[in-house]
Every structure is written in C-alpha cells, then in structure tokens.
Amino acid sequence: MAVVITTTPVKKRKISNRPRCAPGDCVADGRYRVLALLGEGSFGQVYKVCELATGAIGAMKRARHIKNRHLFATELNHLLRLRGAPHVLPLLDHFVDEDGSDVFITEYLDGGNLKEAITARGRLTVPEAMGVLGQMTRALAAAHALDPPILHRDIKPSNILGKRRGDNRVQWFLSDWGLAVDWSGSREPVVSGTYSYTAPEVWDRKRYPVSDIYSLGMTLYFMLFGRPAYEGGSTSVRRLQRAPDPVMVASSCPPGLKNLLEGMLAKDPAHRWSLARVMTHIHKGGRRPRGVMVLQTRLSAGRLWRVRLGDEELDFSWVPGDGTHGGGHEGQTPGSPLSPVQLESWWMGRHSVTRAQFGLFVRETGYVTEAGRRGWGRVWCGEEGRFVLREGVDWQNPGFEQGGDHPVVMVSHKDARAFVRWLAGKVGRWMFLPSRRQWDVACRANHSLAAVMDICRLVERGAGGGTASMQTSSVGAPETLVNAWGLVGMHGNIFEWTGDGGAEGLDLFASTLAGDGKENMGEPRLVSGSTWFSIAPSSSWIGQGWAGEHECNHCLGFRVAGLSLPWES
C-alpha cells in the first residue's frame, strides 16, 4: 500500500468518500459512459469507460476523497509532461469534474498488474524479468531526462501494468504517478512511497534519482523470487540499514544477476548504480532495446545511429571514449589550453538540429520558443560590432532565407533543452546537450592541434562556410566540412549551445549584449563552434564563448548528444 507518513501527529477527522460512479453513468458532458469499477485504492478510483463517439475503451481515474484531488492534479501534470514517453501509461484525455477535481482517461490495459501476474503464475524466469526491467528503465530514462527530472517515488509491481499483444506477449507500462515529484534536490517534507520498496535514505527525508533505482531493484527481486525482499510494517523497514542484504538469501543467483541486484539495492545512494549503468548492464549481453535502430554503416568516424521520427531522420555518430582525449576541463575559461580528460563513449549529433527537425517537435507539442513569445530576437550588426535587437524574428524567420535542412537558429538554451526532453521521450534513452569537453573532443576527432588549426585556416580563407557566406549553410552543403568522425559543421556554420554554464562568463557576454535594455538574458551558458559571419579565432582551435540562457540570435543553435551503451561499442 502506498503511504504518506508525517512525523508530527495530526487530528483525525472523518472524511466521507465521494459517491462511486455506477455502470451506465455518463461523464465529461456525456462523452464517456462508465462500464465498470476496475479498482479502488487509498487515493483514487479507476473505472472502465467507453467513449461514445468512437466506441474506444479507456480507464478513467478520479479522486476517492475531495482532500486528495491535489494528487490527481499533480499526476495529470506529470502525465502531460511524459506524453509519448516509452512504457509510461499513455494519457488519452482529461477534464474537470463537477466539483473541480481533475479526472483523466488513460489507455485501458488488459494484462493486469505485475504483482497479480506473479502471484497467479509464480516468479518470472531471468529473461522475462530482464525484459520487464528493460522496459521500466526506458520509462525512468524519459522521466529522469526531463528538466526538472520527475522522480516516481512509488515503483512497485502493482504499479506496473500489462498490455496483451497479438503475439501472446505482454508489454509493460509504469503507472500511478500521483506521488511523483519534480526533483529539485531539497529535503522532502514527508516520507512517501511503499514500505517494502522505499530506499533507506528516504526515511531521512532525502531522495535522489537513484532512490527510484532502489525501488526498481526491489521490484526486480520480487520478479525473481516471487516475494518482497523485506516484509512487515514501518518499524521493520526503519531497520533496513541493519537488515541483511536481500541478495544474501539469493545464493542461486548467477554472478551477473547478483551484481545487478547488489548495485541497485546498495543502501548508500552514493554507491548505488545509476540508471545509465543499469541500462548498460541489461544490454551488454547483446540484446538491443526495441525502437532503437543501429545501422552498421561505416563513416570515416565509425558507426551511425539513425533515429527515424516520421519523415525526419536524426543521425548520430559514435564518439569513442576508451582512451584519454584532449579537451577542456570544468575549470577552464574559453580559449585556455587543452588538457587530457577521460570520457565515456557517447553518440554525438552528426550535425546541428535542423529547421525541419525542430518543426516536427513544434508541431507535435505546440511549443512556442522564447523569441516567439517575446516577439523579438537579436541579429549581428557588423558596423557596431555587437548584436542588436530586431522585432519579428524567430526560428522560422531569422532574418535570412533558410530551408528545412539548414540548422535551426534563434533558439534559446531553454528551447534547446525542451527539444532534448522531447527526443529523449521518443527514443527512450538519455539525451542531452553535449558538455564543453564532449563538444571539444568530438570536434577535434583525435586530430592533432596543428591539423585542426589547418582546418580553421581553410575556413578562414573561405573554403568552408565562414566569411564566404552571408547566411548559414545547409547541413549537407559541401562547404560544411565533415571531420574524421563524420560530424558536420563543427568548424564553422553556427555557434551551438552546450550543457555547461557558470558565472565566470558573465562579463564576457554582458559586454557583448549590453545596450538594448530590453531584458535580462539569464545565467551564462557556454557556446561552442563558429558562425557564418566570423570564423574560429586564430588563438584557439575552435571558438568558445558565452551567452545568456534566454538569448535568441540568428547564429545560435544546438546539436544533441545521447547515452552510448556497451553493446554499441
């Protein structure tokens, strides 16, 4: 049972339940007819409903008590943010009840929940359990990749629902997001979750993304052994720090599976496995997650990962991380000498995100960019040597002609992160803006500094985009140079947002953008690359600078990076 426990006594008062809906009742202004009550828990009621206009079957969830309706508003908000994410219970519709409570309709899943399935037929085989675990990690990857991340806080077998497929297999979905929170890192005012699945640190009102990993590890234990690792009330659970490790009783576990359980159930969150490590462990045996296609096409760089989204394709080049690369480190300022750092492998967007790709995101989500909301952006004025404000420019109209295969510009750091979150939900793995070190390493592509400087000098002479053009080049144009790892346009076309920021760049960008008095552009963020009107500086092998996170100008875009898994190496 999911619980919310306060540490101070409260006065009990009787709260009457809301009247149940009866079969045949119509709701949402007559759009849905109630067919049956599917279940009732501490907080809510779930009904099987039929949409009268289409005959489609769904599941309607509403609060059991008026006092709990804030939980449903929270759950609805999370489901809206997670719409389209893999293995998250799909949201179909939502409306406001007659008493002002949020009610929502989700897809009706006919496979029951995981707890019921295991209770009825017994524990799962290892391949079956790993299949369910893999699906749940994809759901968590989408939730944790959001900004701010969503922590589920109540992962357990009864909250994993099954959908029967035509091939007699079951697809699993993570449900019940009512206790989920937008994570900020602060201490929690109350302890929430289910006794047997709650991470030890939560009892100290601390919670981290790896707290969800602990709950998922306990769920894996239930799948493998048919019972919870710990049973009993709150008193026994509070002694978890002194209890024996659950894996100690699993003497028949294969070594690899025992390592996975130990990693996910580590009592110290600092030693617990991250979601990325769990995902890599699942797939290192060679099984690939569904929905991800890896094409063994050889570029000068190596392999290509192609993501198909409707009519659009996003190409990523694999960047090796099995050695020490030259690249900046966190303490450096732009233009400082390179120093070696150790990096894990990752996928780097082969080119900047294009207008067509960004347009697909906008059409699907209805997103409005910061420049679009403000009604203005900035363009470079060569005579004044700075960016100046111009009304009516945005990503669709940056001040010069562009096609769908040109890099999207006039987007802020916030706009770029919104695209990344959407893409992460689509592909079911961590996607992110590359860090400065990752961007540097990918640009250099294991070339010597002298060789990269030669490329920059080619751009400066007009052999690339550089000063030879008065606007951006398309990502497939001959002048957008391709480096040894198949990455396009890193030596001159646009500046690109990175995931790094900090106050050290404040004076650098403030002096460049000062003077229009329009709006504070926010915290400084690092940008890397070069533009179509100014080439990479001769003092460094690639341009770096800073811009405020709300800045939108006609030479600033982004590319996306993604998590690499061992089976891809």
Image (spheres, rainbow, N blue to C red):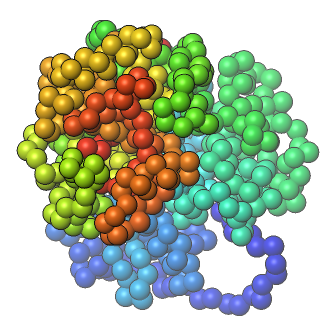
Report if residue 161 is visible in the image.
no
* 78 sits left or right of 9 in the view: left
The location of residue 425, given as percent across then percent down, is 39, 45
Residue at (41%, 15%) from the top-left corner? 445
The residue sitting at the right extreme is: 242
Relative to 413, say whether 496 is above or below. above
Relative to 227, say whether 411 is above or below. below
Residue at (23%, 75%) from the top-left corner? 31
Total residue callouts: 0
* 345 sits left or right of 330 in the view: left
* 520 sits left or right of 558 in the view: right
The residue sitting at the front extreme is: 383
Residue at (79%, 50%) from the top-left corner? 200
Quadrant hosting residue 402? top left
The location of residue 542, given as percent across then percent down, is 39, 27
The location of residue 540, given as percent across then percent down, is 43, 25
Q: Which of 536/366 is in front?
A: 536
Q: Which of 226/247 is in front?
A: 247
Quadrant hosting residue 305? top left
* 206 sits left or right of 336 in the view: right
Quadrant hosting residue 217? top right
Relative to 41, say whether 542 is above or below. above
Q: Which of 445/98 is in front?
A: 445
Assign the N terminus to one quadrant of the image: bottom right
Report if residue 270 is visible in the image.
yes
Residue at (83%, 31%) from the top-left corner? 249
Relative to 360, say whether 479 is above or below. above
